[in-house]
Image (cartoon, rainbow, N blue to C red):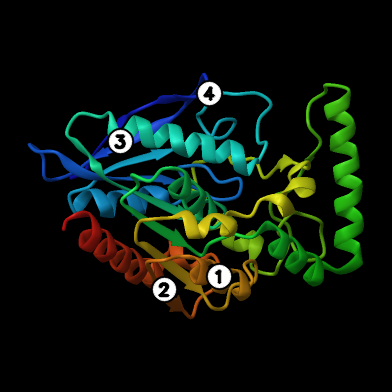
Amino acid sequence: MVERIDSDFESQGTRCAGWLYEPDEAGEESPAIVVAHGFGGERTARLPAFAERFAEAGYAVVLFDYRGFGDSDSEPRHVIDGPAHVADWLAALDHTRALDAVDGDRVGLWGTSFSGGHVVETAARDDDVAAVVSQVPFTDGLRNALHLVRQGGLGYLTETAKAVARDLGRIVTRREPYYVPIVADPDEFGVLNTPDARPGYESLIPPEEDWDNECAARILATVGLYRPVTAASDVDCPVFVAEATADSIIPSKSVDALVEGLDDVERVRYDIGHFDAYIGEDFERIVARERAFFDRVLRN
């Protein structure tokens, strides 16, 4: 049975809530994996399933919430910010390396969707990262924004402009953010409103969780500038990319560009949608392949 304990840390002076999953194989310094969620996600949303599988295989796993999300501190809440999230990743990495019984030279990163880009950016900044898993990765905000606009049409673009204007006005007047839904049905406005977005995202939320389906609209103004793919050539460690070929959110060309930019990459294509990697048989085969990658890189 994997034991989970609280393992909080600070990022730029603010507490990030972390869990440490202690490996089954105790008594010696273990390799470790740092894990966090994607766009607006919290650590409770299916990520414990991945953390438990890795811990059962002998890895120490640190799973954390970004500042302003889940159990972490910071106000205002639910402000999605790629560079700020990367700062949290770097702080989590330092925290993990400093833990007792962790081999600081064998620490890998596991990110999914939006954090599939964060782990690329983090590894590009920290040459000592030993391995990276980037699952259904968001790595090119510009290409992704254009992809969502093409799918949503003029109505999506109009609602985006209105929401951004309202939120920027609140920044100027120092009021609480103007929030928009993270996911919505196709006939409603939300950052993600592809047919599978709402049911897929909600399938990850534990029944007992009271999840707030909202984020500050300002991310819609800045997400196009967030492009971890441009840092791919600076990543020195091996990278495993799990691509969903039926992904309605991540355009395949952005995954192509990521793979082309990496020096040491293993890419596996799965005939699944964006949210299928987290549950059921698809989860089982993907987590097993990711664990095998970590075994090959972090244990040799």
Say few, some or many: other residues with alpha carbon within 10 Å of mark 1 (under 14 / 14 to 19 / 20 or more): many
Tell me where residue 107 appears, x and y as whole percent.
Answer: 29, 45
Looking at the image, tell me whether mark 3 or mark 2 is earlier in sequence order. Answer: 3
SS assignment at label 1: helix
Tell me where residue 46 appears, x and y as whole percent.
Answer: 43, 52
Give the distance between the C-alpha atoms of the residues marked 1 and 2, in whole angstroms.
Answer: 9 Å
Query: Which amino acid does the dot numbered 2 rest on?
Result: Arg
Q: Name the residue under label 2.
A: 267
Query: Which amino acid does the dot numbered 3 rest on?
Result: Leu
| Left or right of 279, for residue 96 | left
Mark drawn on residue 20: 3
Query: Which amino acid does the dot numbered 4 rest on?
Result: Gln
Q: Seen from this angle, which residue lies furthest left?
A: 27
Tell me where residue 119 appears, x and y as whole percent.
Answer: 47, 50
Asked if the residue at tag 2 contacts the one at tag 3, i.e. Cβ–Cβ closer than 8 Å, the answer is no
Instruction: Name which residue lies at 45% across and 53% down.
Output: 111
Instruction: Name which residue lies at 69% across and 69% down.
Output: 195
Looking at the image, tell me whether mark 1 or mark 4 is earlier in sequence order. Answer: 4
Asked if the residue at tag 2 contacts the one at tag 1, i.e. Cβ–Cβ closer than 8 Å, the answer is yes
Query: Which amino acid does the dot numbered 1 rest on?
Result: Val
Asked if the residue at tag 4 contacts the one at tag 1, i.e. Cβ–Cβ closer than 8 Å, the answer is no
Mark drawn on residue 255: 1
| Left or right of 236, for residue 12 | right
Say few, some or many: other residues with alpha carbon within 10 Å of mark 3 (under 14 / 14 to 19 / 20 or more): many
From the image, state whether disc 3 or disc 2 is nearer to you.
Answer: 2
Say few, some or many: other residues with alpha carbon within 10 Å of mark 2 (under 14 / 14 to 19 / 20 or more): some
Viewer-closest of 52 and 127 = 127
SS assignment at label 4: loop
Which quadrant is the N terminus positioned in? top left
Mark drawn on residue 12: 4
Tell me where residue 57 appears, x and y as whole percent.
Answer: 19, 54
